[in-house]
Amino acid sequence: MAAGPLEVAALVAAVAYFVAVVALEIGDADTASLQASADLVADGELWRLFTSGLVVDGFAAPQIVLTAAAAFAVIRLRGALVWWAAVIAGHVGSALLTYAIIGIAGAGGAADDPDFGISCVLGASLGALFASGWRLVGAIGFLALLPFSTGWYGPEHPLSFVLGALVVAAADRLRGRRHPVGRSPQAGRLDAPHEPGVR
């Protein structure tokens, strides 16, 4: 079945995202304006929740390769639209939840620390893979992220994994409601024809 226009657009956007990440890394650009923090988001600079996912924190090459591979696998299994939903929920949702924790805990010293990186895109993609049946790959990836999940921003990694998995689970539930397994499109209709010999 041919992909619809929204799916094609989402696929093109996914490719453009990784091209942008690589371009920013190769160009050695000043990415301070793209980074987020709990304070900046609290001040209303909400776009940073999205742009912070364009900047790589730490060793770039392995992170980009692993994230792209995980994204490719999710897109092959579930489609680009589901991948984007998982990634946005994982990257943005984990940041908002973590910033809320910082605020509730009164950790003012951490609120202005820069928060950026593609690791939550990776975490959300791994969570989506886990929920798609790739349990071992997802679990190993989750465990590999844990050593990097320290500090006040550390909870973002496991949260992104959980949120990415929840998006896929929600997509499955929605799809199941639209197309129940073993139920024909005519089932439930009073005028639906009965097969011979079946009562």
Image (spheres, helix red, strand yellow):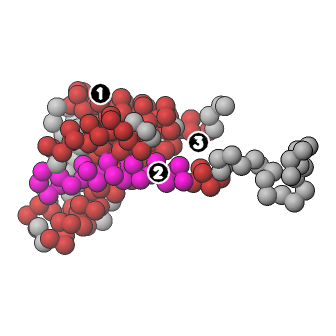
Q: Which class describes the residues within 10 Å of circle 1: few (<14), some (14-19), or many (20+)?
A: few
Q: How many marks are shown on the rendered structure?
A: 3
Rendered view: 38 above or below 53 = below
Mark 2: secondary structure: helix
Q: Are marks 1 and 3 in contact (CB under 8 Å)?
A: no
Q: Which residue is mark 1?
A: 65
Q: Which residues are magenta?
A: 150-173
Choose between 112 and 152: the one closer to the eye.
152
Q: Which residue is mark 2?
A: 169
Q: Which class describes the residues within 10 Å of circle 3: few (<14), some (14-19), or many (20+)?
A: few
Q: How far apart in space, not on screen, are marks 1 and 2 (Cα)?
A: 26 Å
Q: Earlier in the sequence, mark 1 or mark 3?
A: 3
Choose between 136 and 4: the one closer to the eye.
136
Q: Which labelled disc corresponds to residue 21?
A: none
Q: Residue furthest left?
A: 109
Question: Which quadrant is home to the N terminus?
Answer: top right
Whether residue 11 is visible, yes or no, is yes
For the point 29% across and 27% down, which residue is it?
Answer: 65
Mark 3: secondary structure: helix
- The amino acid beneath tag 2 is Ala
Q: Position of residue 44 (x, y in %)?
A: 30, 65
For the point 16% across and 48% down, which residue is it?
Answer: 149
Q: Earlier in the sequence, mark 1 or mark 2?
A: 1
Name the side, left or right, on which 66 lies relative to 32. right
Mark 1: secondary structure: helix
Q: Are marks 1 and 2 in contact (CB under 8 Å)?
A: no
